[in-house]
Amino acid sequence: MFAHKVAKILSVAAVVALVGTWTIETNAVPSYARQTGQECVACHVSFPELTPYGRYFKLTGYTIGKTAITSEGVNYIPGAVMAQASITNTRNNHEIDPNTGETVTITQRNDSLVFTGASFFLASKLNDYVGGFIQWTYNNLATTADGTLGGHSGIDNTDIRVGKYSAPGSAEPDLIYGFTLNNNPTVQDVWNSTPAFGFPFTTAPLANTPAAATQIDGSLAQQLAGLGGYVFWQKTLYGELSFYRTADGAFSFLRQGQDIHTDGGVAALKGYNPYWRLALSHDWGANSIMVGTYGMVIDRYPSNFDTSTPTDRYRDIAFDAQYQYITDPHTFTAQATYIHEKQSYDASFPVTAATGAGIGAGPTPANPTDTLRTFKAKATYYHDRKYGGTIAYFSTTGSADGGLYGTDANGNALTPDSSGWIGELDYLPIQNIRLMLQYTAYNKFNGASTNYDGNGRNAKDNNTLFFNVWVAF
């Protein structure tokens, strides 16, 4: 049965790939390629992984090349469009409803070819010192309040910069410095070992995924406003200090489209929360290597509807590394990151202990403090920047907490532990189209390898085969 589903997915994928190639190849030139006159592979191994030149372009404020509009007229259109279609197959898409005992479907439209969504990028330099991008995304598979799928649009990753740069054709400066305004911690980073642009670059939108994640690993995306400064000295030492606050008031455009009208729909932070980044980098020949650290201290209100309460504190400290070997025709890259999060429930724990309920839609911990640890590593090989393969490992472990993760039949507190492997194959018939086949296999899921939900469901039942077509122009 499973092999038949694989064959079905691959046959439909071949048709989609042919149609996509025929319709896009005549005008597949994204905005920054038009701005710089460079091909996409100058900045990207494969979107969004950056090359050394791509990192330099981002650090200098996206300001290399021409401005879109000058006194002489329009030089290029400062926009780009990205769209995706996909098929998701979950190994076992049914589970037992603990309340009724009936067999129910977990994810909708399993094995179906779906239009995933599309993004519009306003991406360009404004002048020799200011540039950036604003991404607006339409999600065709957003979940509505009643659990059905329905289209929704809102702001996505955004990074606006002021930076020093060198003119086209000149030597790279000994010192690059600048400022960034963004809405997702680590989206401003230039290495692909941090969460915002880390692997997997694309995931199955209809898959069943683990429940626990650290705050810095996507839990705050498109909900905050961050402003900071950075320096990069002699292409070797990088440092950044930024501060994040709730994206409200004058910064509300940075979370436009988020669910601010639901308790728990967005994060609400107290004051300005520090984010730091240090990295040591070295390039030689076709090689580049980086080792670094990053982190954030977050004071978060349990309920975004009530900012009169105390806050829970999350302290995320991370270490990461990246290696790249880029030649023609061989390209090899590897990234790894480890995140340790200490969770201090100074607001939520006392209320939960006293009442049995949290503050609004906030957490209900059984412990005053918990920890959460995430490790991710991947290695990728590309031939001719056209044929690619990736193998990756991921693991999340943490404290047993019955209030957050439930208890087993014997009343023992469960853990958030999940781990597994990802294998991915990529084919780029042209630079602006990527056909991807990805398989995710779980060793553990939400605390256990077998019967993790108490109703007979095993971790491997969530294994996912995912085919995706990505186009940009």
Image: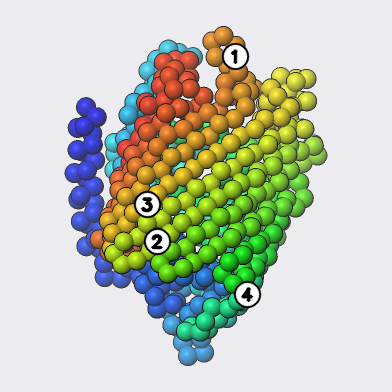
Q: Secondary structure at mark 2?
A: strand
Nearer to us: label 2 or label 4: 2
What is the spatial separation of the Cα atoms under label 2 and label 4, in whole angstroms? 24 Å
Nearer to us: label 2 or label 1: 2
Labels 3 and 1: the sequence-earlier one:
3
Callout 1, which amino acid? Asn
Nearer to us: label 4 or label 1: 4
What is the spatial separation of the Cα atoms under label 4 and label 3, in whole angstroms? 31 Å
Q: Which sits in the foreground, 373 or 174?
A: 174
Name above or below for residue 455 compared with residue 132. above
Labels 4 and 3: the sequence-earlier one:
4
Labels 4 and 1: the sequence-earlier one:
4
Which label number is shown at residue 175? 4
Q: Residue furthest toward the bottom?
A: 72
Q: Position of residue 117 (x, y in %)?
A: 40, 51
Callout 2, which amino acid? Tyr
The answer to which image quadrant residue 26 occupies is bottom left
Residue shown at 37% from the left, 37% from the top: 440
Callout 3, which amino acid? Thr
Labels 2 and 4: the sequence-earlier one:
4
